[in-house]
Image: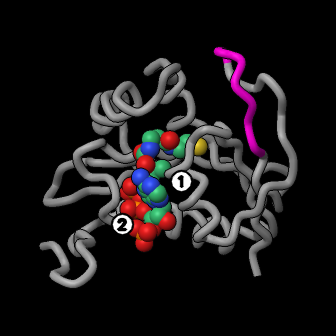
Amino acid sequence: MVCNICDRIIDVRVRRASVRDLDTVYNIEVLSFRNPYPKALLEFYLNLYGDLFLVAEVYGQVVGYIIGVIKWGVLGHILSIAVHPNFRRRGIGSALLREEEYIMKCRGVKVIRLEVRVSNKPAIAMYRKFGYTIAFIKPHYYEDGEDAYVMFKILS
Ligand SMILES: CC(C)(COP(=O)(O)OP(=O)(O)OC[C@H]1O[C@@H](n2cnc3c(N)ncnc32)[C@H](O)[C@@H]1OP(=O)(O)O)[C@@H](O)C(=O)NCCC(=O)NCCS
């Protein structure tokens, strides 16, 4: 169901990913990134950080995912987040990020860090909306030479 006022999809279910989701997650990955993670890497993350590898479902269809990791017990790191192009700007990325932050906070995380292409305006806008701030630039961080912003959020 879609909200008449804000156009958000209301029936979004965020849950832990399973191995059965990997093909769909990989498809979203390929549709979303210039240098997608190989499926084997997604499987590696699922095996290693399964409780922070979440998917968003709409009517039983996986339409987005987020992968995170916790370092040293207190530092959360968002490794990847993507929503299928047909489902963007409907609140799904926000639902994923919100749940990931909640789980990290429950596990003792104090600060969350992420990297984002300096040209990725939609993602930067979402992170800013969630309270992330740009700390510094990592020059030539991506394979094609583009710089990354490193953004942080302190969890209150
Ligand atoms: C970034 C991404 C995950 C956002 O997912 P989404 O489901 O579209 O995000 P939401 O609908 O929850 O939007 C949340 C906020 O992000 C910002 N935003 C999202 N898309 C935007 C766009 N195209 N232009 C400007 N701001 C945008 C807005 O602030 C938005 O809030 P609003 O709709 O109330 O204005 C999605 O665009 C995506 O999958 N991009 C490709 C993969 C990617 O770049 N991942 C990030 C890697 S660092």
Query: Does dot 1 land on a helix, a strand or a loop?
Result: helix
- Is residue 94 at all visible to an observer of this figure? no
Question: Could you tell me which residue is drawn at 67 percent across and 16 percent down?
Answer: 143
Residue position marked by numbered label 2 in the rendering = 91
Q: Does the closest atom of ligand 1 sit within 8 Å of the Cβ of label 2? A: yes
The amino acid on which the numbered mark 2 sits, given as a three-letter code, is Gly
Question: Could you tell me which residue is drawn at 64 percent across and 49 percent down?
Answer: 78
Quarter that holds the N terminus: bottom left
- Residue 142 at x, y = what percent? 69, 23
Crowding near pointer 1: few (<14 within 10 Å), some, many (20+)? Answer: some
Is residue 140 found left or right of 53 in the rendered image? right
Does residue 85 show up magenta in the picture? no
- Residue 62 at x, y = what percent? 26, 48
39 up-or-down from 29: above or below: above
The amino acid on which the numbered mark 1 sits, given as a three-letter code, is Asp
- Residue 72 at x, y = what percent? 86, 52
Ligand 1 falls in which quarter? bottom left
Residue position marked by numbered label 1 in the rendering = 51
Q: Comparing marks 2 and 1, which lies closer to the viewer?
A: 2
Instruction: State the extent of the magenta-drawn residues as a range.
Output: 143-149
